[in-house]
Image: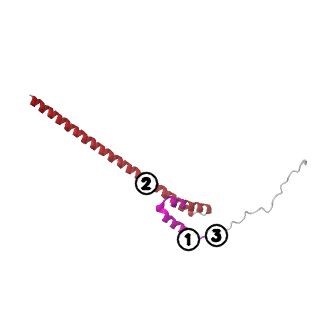
Amino acid sequence: MSTLAERLSARIEAVRTALAVAAGIGAAATLLLAVHRQRHQELAAAHTMHNAAERRVTELYTKAAEQLGSDQAPVQLAGLYALERLAQDTPALQQTIVNVICAYLRMPWAAPQAVPPPATQKYCRPTRRRQPGFRAG
């Protein structure tokens, strides 16, 4: 009987070992899937952040370029400063921004029309000032 008990014990140990190996393989597969999912989420987050940064740069560039088309000199100057800062912060756009600024400077310029002074009234009514000690009456 000792051989039957030894065989039975060996089979039980083989089943335990097979179950342990299966559990280990399952744990490894689960870990591999979790790592893959984590990597996918990190790539998606990086892609989203990159898109947001690109969208922000595009909006800043568009707004600065629109300012160059303004009739008001301070607005145009602000557009130039915005483009300059954008060029410093975004090396990939530096040459494009230099080209835009050069094209802006090459555009024909017309002096603004002289604004006539405001019309003065021909007939002004003098204002009366009260003198100290004087009583109307």
Q: What is the total number of numbered labels drawn onto the structure image? A: 3
Residue 39 place in picture, x, y as percent? 35, 48
Identify the image quadrant of residue 19.
Answer: top left
Mark 1 and 3 residues: CB-CB less than 8 Å, in contact? Answer: no
At a point 89% along the width and 49% down the height, the residue shown is 132
**Marks 1 and 2, the one that precedes in the sequence:** 2
Residue that carries the numbered disc 2 in the rendered image: 50
Q: Which residue of the protein is positioned furthest toward the top in this rendering? A: 1
**Marks 1 and 3, the one that precedes in the sequence:** 1
At a point 17% along the width and 34% down the height, the residue shown is 13
Identify the image quadrant of residue 107.
Answer: bottom right
At a point 22% along the width and 40% down the height, the residue shown is 22
Under circle 2, the secondary element is helix
Observer-nearest residue: 23 or 108? Answer: 23
Is the magenta region chiefly helix, strand or loop?
A: helix
Instruction: Indicate yes or no whether the magenta region holds residue 104.
Output: yes
Q: Residues within 10 Å of mark 3 (few under 14, many from 20)?
A: few
On-image quarter of the N terminus:
top left
Q: From mark 1 to mark 2, how far is it between C-alphas?
A: 34 Å
At a point 41% along the width and 51% down the height, the residue shown is 46
Q: Nearer the viewer, mark 3 or mark 2?
A: 2
Q: Is 32 left, or right, of 50 in this rendering?
A: left
Can the viewer see residue 72?
A: no
* Numbered badge on residue 111: 3
Residue that carries the numbered disc 1 in the rendered image: 106
Q: Is 73 left, or right, of 4 in this rendering?
A: right
Residue 88 place in picture, x, y as percent? 51, 60
Under circle 3, the secondary element is loop
